[in-house]
Image: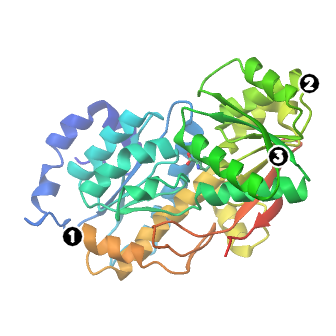
Amino acid sequence: MCRTNRSTWLVSVLIGAWLASGACEQQSASSDASGAPPATGPIRVGHYGSLTGPQASFGVATSNGIRMAIEEFNAAGGLNGRRIELIEYDTKGDAREAGAVVQRLVSSDRVVAVLGEVASGLSLAAAPICQENRVPMISPSSTNPRVTKAGDYIFRICFIDPFQGYVGAKFAREQLQSSRAACLFDQSAPYSVGLNEAFRKEYTALGGTITTEQAYNEGDQDFTAQLSTIRATNPDLVYIPGYYTDVANIALQARRLGITVPLLGGDGWESPKLVDIGGAAIEGAYFSNHYSPEDPDPRIQAYVAKYKAKYGDTPESMATLGYDAAVLPFDAMKRAKSLAGPDLRDAIAATKDFQGVTGKVTIDQDRNAVKPAVILQVREGKMRWVATVEPRR
Ligand code: PHE
């Protein structure tokens, strides 16, 4: 029995090699000699995500969105009657693991497309494998510009960090009237390094001064040295382009050290854990993000209602980007000459004005999506919409 839709990753992680070498042989055997995917039976799509580990809320939310999209597509008849079958593996938030499972998706499972990852560092690790095997990869939410530079098979459905840095800088300068920002970034994450650079560039271009740039590594517990230096430079804002667990710990320690100025960050903040850990220290802080489930747009509200009915909670950006990242290749499959890598790639690259839940998506020549961003604020433990920033022209 080949792996099926539900709890596949768990099974796969335990006995993946055995299954891959034996049970799925029939599937590979039915492909033609050119390596084209089988023309009948379920259409296999892969997802690799952090289902456990320090970024578990990223992978689980993304998986929820992907599963909902697949269920809807299959319920509506699939692709000319062919169902989508999801094959999913856990990266545990680890780059090496990401490479290993994506290798398995493209060579043993013979998926027609790969969805993932959330964290840019993990997408960077797996993209060359998809490129080499000519299997289109679509990242739902990796925002580092280098991700899609791995080659012409690598796409994303989200905006990129040069834009996200601009959004943060513009909001800081114009709405918060900030003129002296300090930065504290995660030097172990390509995402954080890149977003920090983008913010610095845009903030200074808008006339602001960066008082200091301090670094930490994911999982650090003590930020006293960096925060003391930051405090001594007397900033009117602290920009923290990191992931939620570290950001929450930084906020707690910053407030304890008497830093009372606004905190600002990016999409890596989005998790219920930010507030669980950060509590009162994170109240009032702002971050840029992909969409807001509070947006009154009827398309968003219809989606949020469906998601809530299915999973019992409000979909975060990752869930919704996961949903959009799955629907996009389904749409492309309908337009593609065949499901072979080069044909599906061409159809994805030709995507124009695709209406996702997170916005209208046109894939640009660098295989990135051009879309607006939102600014959210933590208020009474909830992430409330504050502003929408349109793409630069
Ligand atoms: N953009 C982040 C990265 O590239 C990941 C992320 C996306 C985190 C969306 C939270 C929400 O690493």
Amino acid at the residue labelled 3:
Lys
How far is the residue under mark 2 from the one under mark 1? Answer: 64 Å
Q: Is mark 3 within 8 Å of ligand 1?
A: no
Q: Earlier in the sequence, mark 2 or mark 1?
A: 1
Residue type pointed to by label 2: Gly
- The three-letter amino acid code for the residue at tag 1 is Thr
Pinpoint residue 325: horizontal percent, then vertical percent. 49, 62
Taking the image as shown, residue 258 lies to the left or right of residue 73, namely right
- Residue 296 in which image quadrant: bottom right
Frontmost of labels 2 and 3 is 2
How crowded pointer 2 is (Cα within 10 Å; few <14, some 14-19, many 20+) is rated as few
Task: In the rendered structure, find residue 285 and report the number of the disc placed on it.
Answer: none
Q: Position of residue 340 (x, y in %)?
A: 24, 70
Q: 173 left or right of 242?
A: right
Q: Position of residue 2 (x, y in %)?
A: 24, 48
Label 3: which residue? 382
Helix, strand or loop status at disc 1: loop
Mark 1 crowdedness (10 Å alpha carbons): few <14, some 14-19, many ≥20: few
> Which is nearer the eye, 351 or 328?
351
- Residue 18 in the figure: left or right of residue 326: left
At mark 2, the secondary structure is: loop
